[in-house]
Image (spheres, rainbow, N blue to C red):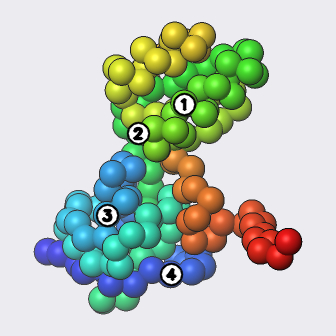
Amino acid sequence: MFVEVYERLDHAHTIDDHIVLDHDMRDKGRFKVMSENGTEVRVFLERGKTLAISECLKTECGKIIEVVGANEEVSDATCEDWQQFSKACYHLGNRHVKIQVLDRVLRIKPDYVLEEMLELLGLTVTNTKAVFIPESGAYAPGYTGHHHHDHEH
């Protein structure tokens, strides 16, 4: 048995089932996955818009499925020195690395080259399993920062 999803919902509903997705899967618009209740879920959504954790999806038969974040392999880099921490943010951003910024913790997907760079910058890197929710970026839909262009001189 399978269900198909074509629609995102913008507010909470009574949940019928859950799908557990890592970051790579949440980044896709089209995929198949088994739900927690054992139903094959075939997702057909617009591309380019990451699924959010706790987001609800509606199946073609009216069931509501909630997206749950999966624990996955991540590397956490920590540092007590704010200047070194800031430099690490700069260097990761300069490489366009997907990064989750926590309280003095930079979380990335495991990458030995980046991990070595972070250690050389004075951060301590540990590998663990956690839900990975990278920053969406300043140009992502829903970004609430204010951006002003002043072209008059």
Q: Which mark is residue 9?
A: 4
Marks 4 and 2, the one that precedes in the sequence: 4
Give the x, y percent position of residue 18. Answer: 39, 63
Residue drawn at x 37%, y 88% is: 62
Q: Earlier in the sequence, mark 1 or mark 3?
A: 3
The disc labelled 2 sits on which kind of residue?
Asn
Q: Which residue is mark 1?
A: 91
- The answer to whether 85 appears left or right of 35 in the picture is right
Q: Name the residue nearer the viewer: 58 or 147.
A: 147
Q: Left or right of 11: which side holds 57? A: left
- Image quadrant assignment for residue 64: bottom left
**Contact (Cβ within 8 Å) of mark 3 with mark 2:** no
Kind of residue at disc 1: His
Q: Residues within 10 Å of mark 3 (few under 14, many from 20)?
A: some
Q: Which circle marks residue 78 in the picture?
A: none
Q: Would you say the residues marked 1 and 3 are in contact, meaning their CB atoms lie under 8 Å apart?
A: no
At x 39%, y 34%, the residue is 109
Of circles 3 and 2, the one toward us is 3
Q: Tag 1 or tag 4, which sits nearer the N-term?
A: 4
Residue 31 in the image: x percent, y percent? 23, 66
The Cα atoms of the two marked residues, 1 and 3, are separated by: 27 Å
Q: Which residue is mark 2?
A: 71
Q: Marks 4 and 1: which is nearer the front?
A: 1
Closer to the N terminus: mark 3 or mark 2? 3
CA gap, disc 4 and disc 2:
24 Å
Where residue 121 sits: x, y (%)? 57, 14
**Residue wearing tag 3:** 28
Query: Tag 2's secondary structure?
Result: strand
